[in-house]
Amino acid sequence: MIEVIFQLTTPLTTSEPSTEYIQLVGGEIRDRESSAIIGRMSSSRVQVGRVSDAGENLFDVMDTHSSDMAEYHAAFFKPNGWDYRERIRRQFPDILPLDLLILDRAEIEPAFRKRGLGLLAISRAIDLFGENCGLVAMKPFPLQFGGYRDSGWRAPEGVPDPVAEFRIARQKLRRYWERAGFKRVDGTEYWALCPGAGRPSLTTVALAIDETCAANE
């Protein structure tokens, strides 16, 4: 059996707001029989409701954590408050809680890819940590193209046309996450789902993966 082991990191005493209000959730995807680690995932839960109750500045909390987190704030939240932007609420009208679950990364070992394990692990993470969040968000990006826009970046071996290959890989990844209920946030490179609006069950996601794999055989 394949399973995911989650690890939640949070301080026991009062700490910096960037660690007090942002919970880091890691996960190891394992083969239970062999105990082999076949993948890893990471996510962050921004406890916006607690930030608001404490009177802290949400942007400062997220910006202190990382520049990537600051970009999420700019895309999703009002500049000087704790609420989602109006355009976000128009696209996702079922937002109720304020918390935001950010899916940072999901990576599977090459021998175990094309089985949808990353998708299933992320779906399970949403089950456990996203139920009381207003949104679950991510920025789909092919890991093999890490640093793609940086100067001096070199294409992976066997990729003659990196521009075309990047576009194809990104489109495949976006379709992959659509199976779990994600859709593109208008005017951004982010994708999100609203747990309050309902989403495909783990069984439905697994069936979609099985059908795709069968079609590709």
Image (tube, rainbow, N blue to C red):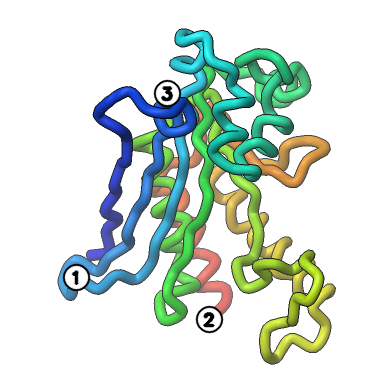
Q: Which residue is mark 1?
A: 35
On residue 154, the disc is none
Residue 90 position within the rendered picture, expressed as x and y whole percent measured from the top left: 74, 19
Count of marks, rendered view: 3
- In the picture shown, does residue 96 fall above or below 193? above
- Give the residue at the far left of this rendering: 33
Asked whether 47 or 60 is in front, the reply is 60
In the rendered image, which residue does mark 3 sit on? 132
Would residue 164 be found to the left or right of residue 29 on screen? right
Amino acid at circle 3:
Asn
Q: What is the quadrant of the N terminus in the image? A: bottom left
Query: Under tag 1, what secondary structure?
Result: loop
Residue 19 position within the rendered picture, expressed as x and y whole percent measured from the top left? 42, 33
Q: CA distance from mark 2 to mark 3?
A: 39 Å
Residue highlighted by disc 2: 217
Residue kind at label 2, given as amino acid type: Glu
Residue in the image at 83% along x and 83% along y = 161
